[in-house]
Amino acid sequence: IACAYAMQGKTDPLAAAAAVVAGYHAVHPLTEAELVALFPLICTRLSVSVVNSALQRVSFPDESYLTISEPDAWATLERLETAHPRLAHYEFRAAAGLEPCLNAPLVTSWLRAHQDVIGPLLGAGGPITVLDLSLGSPLVETPVEPGDLPAFTRKVFERIRDAGAKIGVGRYDEPRILYTGPRFQADGNDRDVPRTVHIGLDLFVEPGTQILAPLAGVVESVRDNGMDLDYGPTMILRHEPADGPVFYSLYGHLGREVLGTLRPGARVERGQSIATVGDLDVNGGWPPHLHLQLITDLLDRDGEFPGVARSDRRAAWKSLSPDPNLIARLPEHLLARPHRSGRDILASRRGHVGPSLSVSYRRPLTIVRGWKQFLYDEDGLRYLDAVNNVAHVGHSHPRVVRAVREQMAVLNTNTRYLHERLVEYAERLTATLPAPLSVCYFVNSGSEANELAIRLARAATGRRGIVVIDAGYHGNTTTLVDVSPYKHDGPGGSGPPPWVRKIPLPDLYRGRFRREDPDPGRRYAAFVADAMDALGANGEPAGAFLAESVLSCGGQIVLPDGFLAEVYRRIRAVGGVCIADEVQVGFGRVGTTFWAFETQGVVPDIVTMGKPIGNGHPLGAVVTTPDIANAFANGMEYFSTFGGNPVACAAGLAVLDVIAEEGLQTHAARVGESLLQELGGLVTRHPIAGDARGLGLFVGLELVRDRDTREPADAEATYVANRMRDRGVLVSTDGPDHNVLKIKPPLCFEPADADRLVETLDQVLSEDYVRSDRTTGD
């Protein structure tokens, strides 16, 4: 009964029931008889439910409540109609931590004990090499079914030849990026869970290579999958050893001639030629190879059996298809897993990486590939990346990758030599900025850029004093921690040095002056006078004002109108300079303008850039005026070994090209406006959602426990970020109280992605933990 109700309304009812089984079995272990009976009993319960609803409808036609569960019960029954009862049994055994298929250990034990009677598999042998076809494999450049299969085939066989081998081996139990496309999506998922785990063994050889029967058996089926699935013909042999269990072996991607040579029921002997490896034209263009698979229970399937499985069903399907190397007999050490698991990585990281380096999410992610607005974990699960503004134009953008690769193959050296890439990039970059911002310095990161900006300001003014905004963050160097209240006022911080003063966060939702106050921008800006006075009293007159043009760590704060104009006026009136930190918000992210400072109608004296500037390649820049650059040129050389190298400049140029050619600034404005409106709808529907704000694709949703007091809901925000991760959408938290969900995805974020984000957020905000009141224990 519990399972039947847990299944209703779920697109994957078996997974819901398995979760109940796992929890129940942990407390009250189920017997084998109970596990066998459970699936039929669940179906019986659902059948009773719909019959009872039909009776209630006739007996009490005006009482709709009595039939309220009928549609979900019928939908669940219809989904379960396609579930094989024995597979359901195996899923429940797996959930209980038991060997799923009872026949599996019998088969594997028999094969291990009879290795001497197993014959060869291929008619032509030779040296082997193992190919990495996993999620992070460079053999596959895009995380979808390869569009250029002939090129993929060439790469596979080039890799085999380069290794001096005749046979390339694709591993068993390997999650593969090749299988994340639509063809491999499983029916009925609560989230995007494709069938990515390869449960066979691949042997890449020349087409026409003879395939031999390693064991005597009977042809169970010969099926041509080429017409509908592009897999080519598949043969399954049934093996019935006199002293062992019945099992099956599957041979896929065969030459089409097998269709006329062996028919179901035909006897084959060990060593008999049963087929050949098919060419590209019979299996959809995939590289010629034999797919070998063991099967312990055919599940009454007629000639077609999955060769890949969902990662969340791995245990059951590995029991149904154990390691086929038991009959291929390749050297085991060559087939060992080439990549560490997330658990191993985390353990090593704790021992060898500084503990100050944090890991995102309650259940850390092992991310192995990125593509456009998506990230992929080690099992092939796809996550919508709504927080990574480093991959500005999209993860692994081919244009940027190609530019970096081509330049790296030719030259990568420092700026002491003349190279056209440097000046071309400087010209292109400064062309996006208003006059007189025309002189560039290239560095490797946003931290280096802000560090250099402070040096430039000091050289131009002769002063150390600097004014910053509360909760601001500008980098990880010693100087930048000193000017970042987000760090020096937080855990482990020791407060600001005497040459730093902060002004209040210009927060129109929870700050001193709010949206309903008259002219809040100028009122917040007036605090600069007090900060400058305090610096002067310390003997450190103000030389600079440093602020992000939209505040990130402050909680995705859009500055009030007129704020920067008034602050800049006051700073310049005392001879100071104005630094705009555009590390997170530049390059078209805010949509309406290319640079976020332009939304405030100001022109800074110094602009710093990082993160998105190279789409992940280490690149940063500082752009300033000729006067400030001349003041900095005091005889001391400024040099960055890697800053402005040809490869970095190639990446930067490619990013500018992509932004322009793909219209990403306009795209950010359009998608961001719609996203902000949808988030505003969440504010209307959910009391915990206090404020939605942002510009373009730089957006925040602030969570509060009380709309009147605006008490920050920090624990709830952390919960929401983790639950979003569980549902395949990545967001994070920020703000002084860590109660703001920050949303700053790659600019290729589509309207459908925004819809998915909001829909998922809507569901999570409706969960009991978020909706309850922990202050009263409700």
Image (spheres, rainbow, N blue to C red):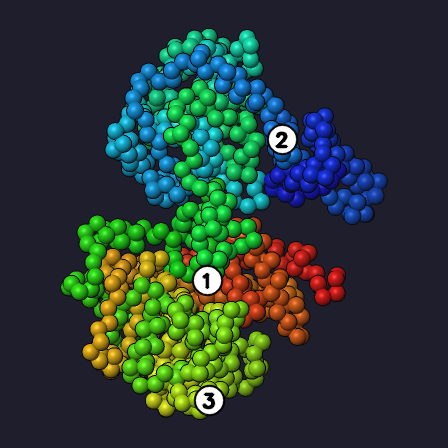
Q: Secondary structure at mark 2?
A: loop
The amino acid type of the residue labelled 1 equals Lys
Cβ atoms under marks 1 and 2 closer than 8 Å: no
* Quarter of the rendering occupied by the C terminus: bottom right
128 versus 58 height, above or below: above
Q: Earlier in the sequence, mark 1 or mark 2?
A: 2
Task: Using the image as rendered, state which of residue 517 and residue 582 is in the foreground.
Answer: 582
In this rendering, which labeled residue sits more in front, label 1 or label 3? 3
Q: Secondary structure at mark 3?
A: helix
What number is the disc on residue 744? 1
Q: Earlier in the sequence, mark 3 or mark 2?
A: 2
The amino acid type of the residue labelled 2 equals Leu
Q: Please indicate, yes or no, whether residue 274 appears anywhere in the rendered image.
A: no
Tally the marks: 3
CA gap, disc 1 to disc 3?
Answer: 36 Å
CA gap, disc 1 to disc 2?
Answer: 43 Å
Q: Residues within 10 Å of mark 2 (few under 14, many from 20)?
A: some
Q: Is residue 91 left or right of residue 482?
A: right
Q: Which residue is mark 3?
A: 534
Cβ atoms under marks 3 and 2 closer than 8 Å: no
The quadrant holding residue 129 is top left
Q: Secondary structure at mark 1?
A: loop
Q: Residues within 10 Å of mark 3 (few under 14, many from 20)?
A: some
Q: Position of residue 347 (x, y in %)?
A: 49, 47
